[in-house]
Image (cartoon, rainbow, N blue to C red):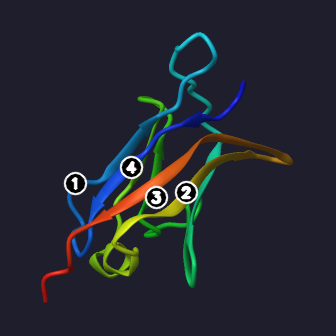
């Protein structure tokens, strides 16, 4: 199974709406693996954000029942994203020693954070 490429748009300085990915197999069926955890890595020139669904209160959750991974960025995290299409993310499944990137793509940061 190869990684899907999906672009994400985030309003800088907001923590709503959350970003939600549904994890599916090659046939398009929900991939439900209760023992899995996921790591989200967001990078841009001069910065990065790393989230782990295995760490409570990280803002990244995995629901095996619906096969969805949800990232709720904090207002500080979304504000730190550069304005424009300048950030790249990868979402990787981790299960014991197995690692697989399920989805990756560009993040477009919109607007200026409201203080």
Q: In this view, does 33 lie to the left or right of 10?
A: right
Check contact, mark 2 vs mark 3: CB within 8 A. no
Viewer-side label of 2, 3: 2
Q: What element carries label 1?
A: loop
Viewer-side label of 2, 1: 2
| Distance (Cα) linking label 4 and label 3 | 15 Å
Q: What element carries label 4?
A: strand
Residue that mark 1 sits on: 17
| Distance (Cα) linking label 1 and label 3 | 13 Å
Q: Nearer the viewer, residue 33 or 47?
A: 47
Q: Position of residue 7 (x, y in %)?
A: 43, 45
User: Residue lying furthest right in this view?
Assistant: 97
User: Residue lying furthest top in this view?
Assistant: 27
Q: Which mark is first along the chain, 3 or 1?
A: 1
Label 3 packing within 10 angstroms: few (<14), some (14-19), many (20+): many
Residue that mark 4 sits on: 8
Check contact, mark 4 vs mark 3: CB within 8 A. no
Q: Which mark is first along the chain, 1 or 4?
A: 4
| Distance (Cα) linking label 4 and label 1 | 12 Å
Give the quarter of the figure containing the C terminus: bottom left
Q: Which of 102 and 113 is in front in this view?
A: 113
Q: Residue 99 carries which label?
A: none
Q: Nearer the viewer, residue 45 or 89?
A: 45
Q: What element carries label 2?
A: strand
| Distance (Cα) linking label 2 and label 3 | 13 Å
Residue that mark 3 sits on: 60
Label 1 packing within 10 angstroms: few (<14), some (14-19), many (20+): few
User: Residue lying furthest bottom in this view?
Assistant: 115
Label 2 packing within 10 angstroms: few (<14), some (14-19), many (20+): many
């Amino acid at each position: 199974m190869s990684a899907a490429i999906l672009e994400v748009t985030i309003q800088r300085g907001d923590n709503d709406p959350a970003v939600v990915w549904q994890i599916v197999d090659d046939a398009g069926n929900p991939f439900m693996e209760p023992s899995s955890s996921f790591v989200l890595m967001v990078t841009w020139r001069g910065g990065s954000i790393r989230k782990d669904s295995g760490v409570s209160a990280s803002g990244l959750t995995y629901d095996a029942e619906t096969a969805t991974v949800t990232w709720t960025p904090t207002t500080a995290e979304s504000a730190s994203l550069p304005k424009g299409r300048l950030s790249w993310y990868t979402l990787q499944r981790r299960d014991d020693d197995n690692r697989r990137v399920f989805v990756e793509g560009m993040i477009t940061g919109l607007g200026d954070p409201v203080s």
